[in-house]
Amino acid sequence: MKKVKILHMYADMLDLYGDSGNMEIIRYRCGMRGIECQVDSYSIDSEMPDFSSYDLIYIGGGADLEQQHISADLMKCREGIIKAYSSGTFMFLICGGYQLMGKFYRDADGNEIKGLGLFDYHTVAPQSRKMRCIGNIVLRTNITGKPVEVVGFENHGGQTHGVKTPFGEVLYGNGNCAGSKAEGYIEKNVIATYLHGPCLSKNPEIADYMIGYCINRGQAEHITLEPLDDTLEKKCRSVMLKRLLNE
Ligand code: GLN
């Protein structure tokens, strides 16, 4: 079976609420199935990698300051990332990372951080720093072909506008904008979301969707992933669903 190659960008700066844990989870779920998984790191001033050689590029979330610090470096990677995405590399983006792939992020002080412009949306934070979307969140997505409830935790000032294909419908919490019904952004090879947690810990279907995508990319024969025992993960999720939705 093909090895899964992942590039984790700016792990030293964008790692809010244990976002790096998402990589541990993917590594673990590959390992349990005997799939080799290589996670390389890239950060400011690392040697420019061959982005297209990766099956998945991952960027976590972070505070405005960290986003400002990495933005110039991210611009240097623009061409390589666009090429990789266009050739089918999966983009998994959390919160600050999600915002930076859009057109721009305007913070509460009015500073505009240029995004990579890979996607059409943009993000604006309200002028009052007190107005943030903070708390548990539940959404329903169809990305796996059947409805899955996804739980996590959001904490963002930025309000994301212009998303045409959201990751899911919000059942509890805010999502892209305060009180909105839409959360995140998806394409066949993109999941961008405000969910921290790390978000894959209670949502194993999402992890497997990405692993399945990666191992099947460019392969003639389709491989179906062996199911794992997700009793604990699902139990954790049901506790949250019961608490938040009374399900
Ligand atoms: N700094 C951004 C905001 O507040 C992103 C925060 C995050 O990644 N959680 O909107």
Image (tube, rainbow, N blue to C red):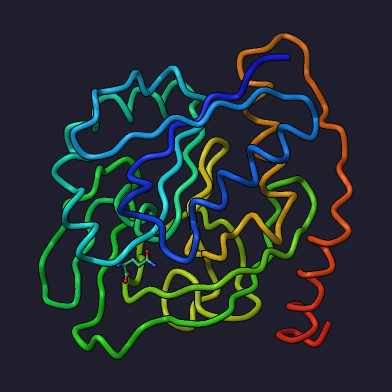
Q: Is residue 137 above or below residue 57?
A: below
197 sits left or right of 226 in the view: left
User: Residue 159's quadrant in the figure?
Assistant: bottom left
Q: Residue at x 52, y 82 (%)?
A: 135
- Relative depth, front residue between 32 and 226: 32
151 sits left or right of 16 in the view: right
On the image, the x and y values in percent for residue 25 come to 65, 46
Q: Residue at x 81, y 73 (%)?
A: 238
- Relative depth, front residue between 21 and 68: 21
Q: Is residue 179 above or below residue 216?
A: below
In terms of image quarters, where does ligand 1 lie? bottom left
Residue furthest toward the top?
220
On the image, the x and y values in percent for residue 142 come to 71, 53
Q: Is residue 74 above or below residue 220?
A: below
- The N terminus appears in which quarter of the rendering? top right
Q: Residue at x 34, y 22 (%)?
A: 83
- The C terminus appears in which quarter of the rendering? bottom right
On the image, the x and y values in percent for residue 201 come to 67, 58
Q: Residue at x 32, y 76 (%)?
A: 157
